[in-house]
């Protein structure tokens, strides 16, 4: 229980930008819940393709900023690019667990394209707000994976064997199952949540 409470911690909005970021994420959550309902494997496949966008956008813009100013990025670039790669590995893992349908692949193209351009512009206008959005997105991801884990524990979802790609990436036991994968992914998302909230605080 203490571990779960730690995972589900929430950053209370402190100003107008925070509140707008929080409302925007709740708006996205409403559509995700409406479309996927309790199909958490398919939800993960689609949403992880979007979750991998902010780190790459933020990393590239921080890279350009460092070049323009000819000064250190203080480790932000590597942190953000690593975040993007980590989210991509989440996707590669869940593709093996929940095969996306043709419609979901089309949805990925449309949503990812729209979100990339939105986030790029947001980061140019207000990097602090952009990072706060990601912080709140990751809070929702932690909540979703916690619910998914509870469903595995109560038998709602089959505790299938972990894909080989997940065992290799997270160094899991050879006989690891979906439960261990969800725990590893949730821990990643909690880290991304904390990092992005901290970046937003620093920029504010």
Image: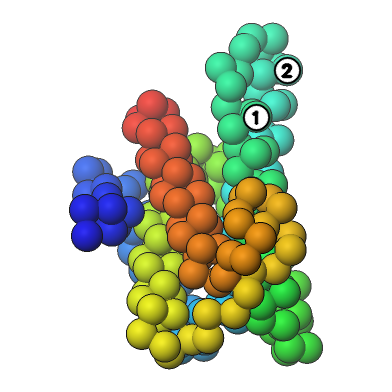
Image quadrant occupied by the C terminus: top left
Horizontal and vertical percent for residue 75?
Answer: 58, 22
Horizontal and vertical percent for residue 195?
Answer: 44, 37
The residue to which callout 1 is attached is: 78
Closer to the camera in the image, 154 or 12:
154
Horizontal and vertical percent for residue 96?
Answer: 72, 74
Displayed quadrant of residue 97: bottom right
Q: Say few, some or many: other residues with alpha carbon within 10 Å of mark 2 (under 14 / 14 to 19 / 20 or more).
A: few
At a point 44% along the width and 68% down the height, the residue shown is 145
Closer to the camera in the image, 174 or 4:
174
Q: Is residue 96 visible?
A: yes
Horizontal and vertical percent for residue 152?
Answer: 44, 80
At a point 38% along the width and 26% down the height, the residue shown is 202
At a point 50% along the width and 37% down the height, the residue shown is 127
Displayed quadrant of residue 166: bottom right
Q: Say few, some or many: other residues with alpha carbon within 10 Å of mark 1 (under 14 / 14 to 19 / 20 or more).
A: some
Q: Secondary structure at mark 1?
A: helix
The residue to which callout 2 is attached is: 67
Q: Is residue 11 left or right of residue 145?
A: left
């Amino acid at each position: 229980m203490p571990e779960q409470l730690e995972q589900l911690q929430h950053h209370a909005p402190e100003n107008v930008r925070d509140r707008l970021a929080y409302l925007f994420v709740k708006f996205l959550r409403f559509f995700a819940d409406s479309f996927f309902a309790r199909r958490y494997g398919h939800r993960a496949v689609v949403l992880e393709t979007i979750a991998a966008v902010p780190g790459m956008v933020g990393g590239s813009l921080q890279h350009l900023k460092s070049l323009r100013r000819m000064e250190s990025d203080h480790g932000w670039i590597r942190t953000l690019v690593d975040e993007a790669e980590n989210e991509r590995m989440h996707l590669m893992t869940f593709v093996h667990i929940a095969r996306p349908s043709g419609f979901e692949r089309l949805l990925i193209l449309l949503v990812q394209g729209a979100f990339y351009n939105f986030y790029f512009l947001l980061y140019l206008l207000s990097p602090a707000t952009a990072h706060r959005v990601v912080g709140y997105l990751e809070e929702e991801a932690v909540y979703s994976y916690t619910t998914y884990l509870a469903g595995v524990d109560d038998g709602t979802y089959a505790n299938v064997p972990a894909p080989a790609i997940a065992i290799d990436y997270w160094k899991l036991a050879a006989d690891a199952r979906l439960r261990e994968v969800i725990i590893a992914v949730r821990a990643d998302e909690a880290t991304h949540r904390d990092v992005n909230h901290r970046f937003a605080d620093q920029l504010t």
